[in-house]
Image: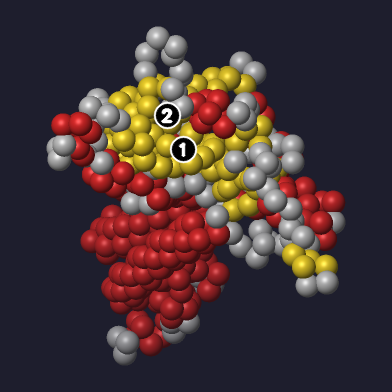
Amino acid sequence: MFFRLVYQSFYRQRRNKLLAATAIVFGVAVATAMIAVATDIGDKMNRELRVYGPNLVAYPQEDTLDVEIGGVNLKPITSGAFLKESDLPKLKGIFWGHNITGFAPFLSLNVNAALNNTANHAGSDANANSPTEIPVELIGTYFAKTIHYGKEDFVTGVRSTYPWWKVQGEWPQDELSAKQPIEVLAGIQFADQHHLKPGDVLRVVDRELKITGILSTGSAEEKAVMAPLALTQQIAGRPDAVRRLYVSALTKPEDAFARRNPSTMSREMRDRWYCSPYANSIALQISEALPYAHAEQIRQVAQNEGSVLSRIKGLMWLVTLAALLAAVLAVSAAVMNTLMVRRREIGLMKALGATRSSVAALFFAEGAMLAIVAGGLGFALGILLAQRISLSVFGSSIHVEVALLPIVLLISFFILLSGSALALRRAVRLDPTVVLRGDL
């Protein structure tokens, strides 16, 4: 009899049940989509925000020393302090090595470059063929160099760490060749000042440098010449030397725990901090991997990333709460309408001996069936919506954990119970005498 009553309720109240189910489906769909995107947005946003450049920097420990005695600053002269290029592959061996998406070492020095560009000497025939030497900063780095670590090969350099850099022409090769001119980039300001273009040749310390492209960065590199790191090491007489190392890593937004000093933590807390992908913990691991190196986060970049991510997540949770509230109100209206239609049925049940718990159990069974069916449909619709959002915003699909389904079903039950609580309370308190007499 109980199940027959439940079936008859769905059959006779199809419109009200459909309205309540639709509200639950859409509320659950929005909640599913927002939860799925919010749980997966961290890595995707980090990859998108990597266009802002590296978020970690490493340099020699000597650069951090600052000693003052008797008013005299005894900070050591660090022009001879360098990192070792041969140690750089060790970055892929740290705990969060797979989170490091790229790195670029830098070594710069000031040189005199000889220009054979005759456009600067149109004034006299005597000077037309004589090269002009001008001072310029030569910056050595990786463009897109293949690095070997263990059995793994990966490509890294400024092309991955600074994706917004633009080159008019071709990117240079990182490898030096004795038979061909060494390929370099000329900063756009330097090129404009001296009327340089791709294909022109500079001479630096008896080495021919062929300009393959003009570089635009919006920074100081536009006034310099970018060359393979090996070239600057040879000219400087510093084999294996690196002055600065900039690293791009996927990190977790900084919170209060991330900013704590690990040396003051207990062993368990430090292990949790160390094994979390915070910028500070990855920087510490880089310092441990590179001898005599000090690594730290570039705070402006890291803080901006955390701020953007927090605001986006806050907006998503606000949309979720608004969708759930709308679903609760719609369910409440549908259930209240159902109660008004079925009040004589409820009064008759109570007159025949049904208890309050029996009436409540009937409504709860109806609601449970509705919540399961509508929740399942809402979950499927929410996954499709999450995939659509991820593809349109990030250009990649999203992975939804199966463990999200029980949470979604609980949300569905919450919507139904919250929306029907008032109607259920009125149903169990109906006086059969008043209802059957028609006074209500």
Residue 395 vertical position relative to residue 363 in the rendered view, above or below: above
Element carrying mark 2: strand
Please state, as top left, top right, bottom left or bottom right, where the C terminus lies in the image: bottom left
Q: Residues within 10 Å of mark 2 (few under 14, many from 20)?
A: some
Regarding residue 171, the answer to whether it shows in the image is no
Q: Which mark is residue 204?
A: 2
Residue 419 placement, left or right of 392? right
**Location of residue 136 by image quarter:** top left
Regarding residue 438, the answer to whether it shows in the image is yes
Q: As rendered, which of 425 and 402 lies closer to the eye? A: 402
> Looking at the picture, which amino acid does disc 1 mark?
Val
Q: Residue at x 26, y 41 (%)?
A: 194
Q: Residue at x 48, y 82 (%)?
A: 429
Give the image location of residue 169, x and y in percent. Answer: 24, 30
Residue 122 placement, left or right of 2? left
Give the image location of residue 133, x and y in percent. Answer: 36, 36
> Looking at the picture, which amino acid does disc 2 mark?
Val
* Callouts 2 and 1 close, C-beta under 8 Å: yes
Q: Residues within 10 Å of mark 1 (few under 14, many from 20)?
A: some
Q: CA distance from mark 2 to mark 1?
A: 7 Å
Q: As rendered, which of 420 and 61 lies closer to the eye? A: 61
Which numbered disc, 2 or 1, marks the residue that appears first in the sequence? 1
Residue 108 placement, left or right of 73? left
Q: As rendered, which of 378 and 173 lies closer to the eye? A: 173
Q: Which mark is residue 385?
A: none
Give the image location of residue 175, x and y in percent. Answer: 46, 19
Residue wearing tag 1: 111
Q: Residue at x 48, y 34 (%)?
A: 140
Please state, as top left, top right, bottom left or bottom right, where the N terminus lies in the image: bottom left
Q: Residue at x 42, y 29 (%)?
A: 204
Element carrying mark 1: strand
